[in-house]
Image (cartoon, rainbow, N blue to C red):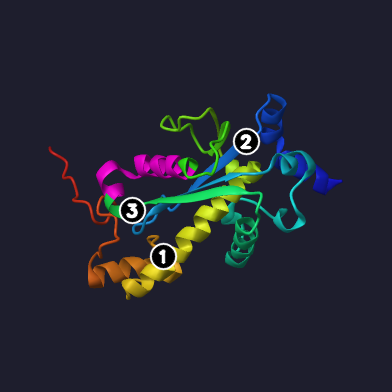
Amino acid sequence: MSGKINKLRQFRFELALVEQGFVRIAGVDEAGRGPLAGPVFAGAVVFPLRWITEGLPKSLQGINDSKQLTSAEREELFADLTSQPDLDFAVAQVEALVIDQINILQATHRAMSLALARLQHPPQHVLIDGLAVKSITFPSTPLVKGDALSYSIGAASILAKVSRDRLMSELDRQFPGYGFAEHKGYGTPSHMAAIKQLGPCPIHRQSFAPFRPVQKELL
C-alpha cells in the first residue's frame, strides 16, 4: 500500500494536470548551478500518459531527486530512461563563458528553455524545479524541491546531473590537475588548492568567487 501511496504522491501534480486535459507534461530541472567550473546543464522529460495514470515501469520506480541518489543509482536510472522508446527527453548545456556574460541565473533559465525546445514534440505544460522561469514560454508550474515531489522533474534532474558529471570527467582529462572528475567543479578544499597552485583554466567561471575582482567598500 505504501508503494502505491508514494507513486500517487510523486505523480500528483501530473495527475492534476491530466484531469485538466493536458497530455504532454514536461518536467525540467538543472544541474551545476553552484560549481566554480564547467557548464550548467538542464534536462527535460515527458513521460507517456499511461505511465502517469498507470505507474512507472519497475526499473524506473527509484526515480528521485538526483542528489538523493548514489552515482551508481543515477547511472542505472539514466541508462533505463534513455533506452525507453516511448520517453521524450532532451538535455542542454550553457558554457562557462556564457555564464560569465549573462550570470548563472539567466544561464540556468536558458539551459532549461533549450532543453524544452529540443524535445521531439512541444509540451503542453511544464513542471519546473524551483521558482518560476519567465523565459519559459509554455504554461508552467514551479515546484520548490520539485525533483523530490514529481517523477517528471526527478527524471529530468537525473538526466542533467549524469550528463554533466560525465562531461566533467572528460574535462578532467583535458585540464588535468584540478580534480574535475572527483568534485565536478564544486569549490572543495582540493579544488581551491589546485586553483591557488595552477590558476584558473578556460572552463572556470570567472564571474564566480574567488575569480571575480573584490569590490572594496568605499568609506
- Asked whether the beta carbons under mark 1 and mark 3 sit within 8 Å of each other, the answer is no
Q: Label 1 vs label 3: CA separation?
A: 12 Å
Q: Magenta segment range?
A: 98-115
Q: Residue furthest right?
A: 1
Q: Residue furthest left?
A: 219
| Tag nearer the camera, 3 or 2 | 2
Q: Position of residue 177 (x, y in %)?
A: 32, 75
Q: Answer left or right for 210 relative to 158.
A: left
Residue tagged 3: 95
- Above or below, 50 against 69 in this view is above
Q: Residue at x 25, y 62 (%)?
A: 202
- Asked whether the beta carbons under mark 3 and mark 2 sit within 8 Å of each other, the answer is no
Element class at badge 3: loop
Residue tagged 1: 168
Q: Label 1 vs label 2: CA separation?
A: 32 Å
Q: Residue at x 42, y 29 (%)?
A: 134
Q: Position of residue 85 (x, y in %)?
A: 65, 53
Residue tagged 2: 24
As rendered, which of 87 and 59 lies closer to the eye? 87
